[in-house]
Image (tube, rainbow, N blue to C red):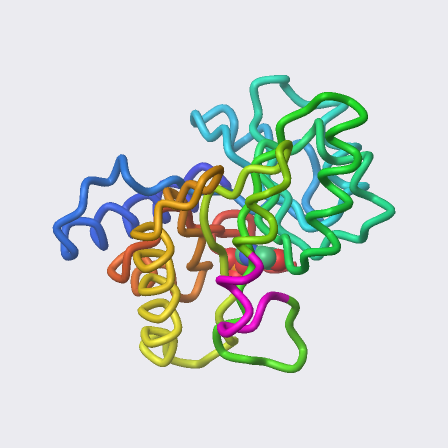
Amino acid sequence: MVREQLQKVQERMEAACRRAGRDPKEVTLIAVSKTKPAEMVMEAYAQGQRDFGENKVQEILEKEMVLPKDIRWHMIGHLQRNKVRQVIDKAVLIHSVDSVRLAQQIEEEALKRDLDVDILLEVNVAREESKFGFLPEEVEEGILTISRFPHVHIQGLMTIAPFVENSEENRNVFKKLFQFYVDMKSKNIDNVNMDVLSMGMSGDLEVAIEEGATMIRVGTSIFGSR
Ligand SMILES: *Cc1c(COP(=O)(O)O)cnc(C)c1O
């Protein structure tokens, strides 16, 4: 089942890229395997999928131990500071850096172990009370502060768009994040790359790709509902 569903998602991605005049190679699919067993991850792995997303540190650690070493694990959920130490050498990218304090903690742990850690800043574009992330007006200052942490490397921005019935309702959220991404890129800040724009999930991946996503995080459409 995973095989067919994964294939369908890849077809949706390709169709959206065609509509947007984009090269499908510009968009990385992250298969969000949270709550799903290692066997299902292996079904996707057998089809060539290598990027997987998890929202809990414990689940990355458990799966990482038993699954192939060439899997790239993405930390996409809220990260508590006391869990940083466990995840910084396991995840290729932490999408969910939502405060300067968290970035500071990553810097301290990375310094101790001489690691380089790639991160995205999570932006609460729609200003939802229930969501983590920098508010739009906090993003630039956050980037400037974090850019001075030598072991932490900002690679781009991430957002979790609101849950909506019609994905078109999120087009403006994605447009806004893309605009931030372009603005920040144009500032050419030292130790800051703006190459990754992580947005779009099962319900709205097409709109996100049309608006410039370079990574989409898809769970339900590949692995079924949770
Ligand atoms: C669960 C999750 C996703 C995947 O959501 P689906 O709607 O199942 O595709 C994407 N991003 C984050 C941060 C998540 O926690």
Q: Position of residue 180 (x, y in %)?
A: 37, 63
Task: Tell me if residue 4 comes above or below residue 133 in the rendering.
Answer: above
Q: Is residue 55 left or right of residue 215?
A: right
Task: Tell me if residue 93 comes above or below residue 116 in the rendering.
Answer: below
Camera-nearest residue between 8 and 146: 146
Q: Quadrant of the C terminus?
A: bottom right
Q: Position of residue 41 (x, y in %)?
A: 60, 34
Which residue is farthest top?
69
Specify the quarter for ligand 1: bottom right
Task: Tell me if residue 2 comes above or below residue 170 in the rendering.
Answer: above
What type of secondary structure mainly makes up the magenta span? Answer: helix
Q: Position of residue 162 (x, y in %)?
A: 51, 75
Q: Is residue 127 left or right of residue 149?
A: left
Camera-nearest residue between 104 and 73: 104
Camera-nearest residue between 170 and 122: 122
Q: Is residue 174 left or right of residue 162?
A: left
Residue located 77% across and 45% down the image: 105
Residue located 69% across and 29% down the image: 90
Q: Position of residue 223 (x, y in %)?
A: 55, 48
Which residue is farthest right?
82
Quarter of the image holding residue 69? top right
Task: Tell me if residue 74 comes above or below residue 102 in the rendering.
Answer: above
Q: Which residues are magenta?
A: 133-142
Q: How many marks?
A: 0
Determine if residue 1 is in view.
no
Residue 118: in magenta span = no
Quarter of the image holding residue 130? bottom right
Determine if residue 170 is in view.
yes
Residue located 55% across and 69% down the image: 138
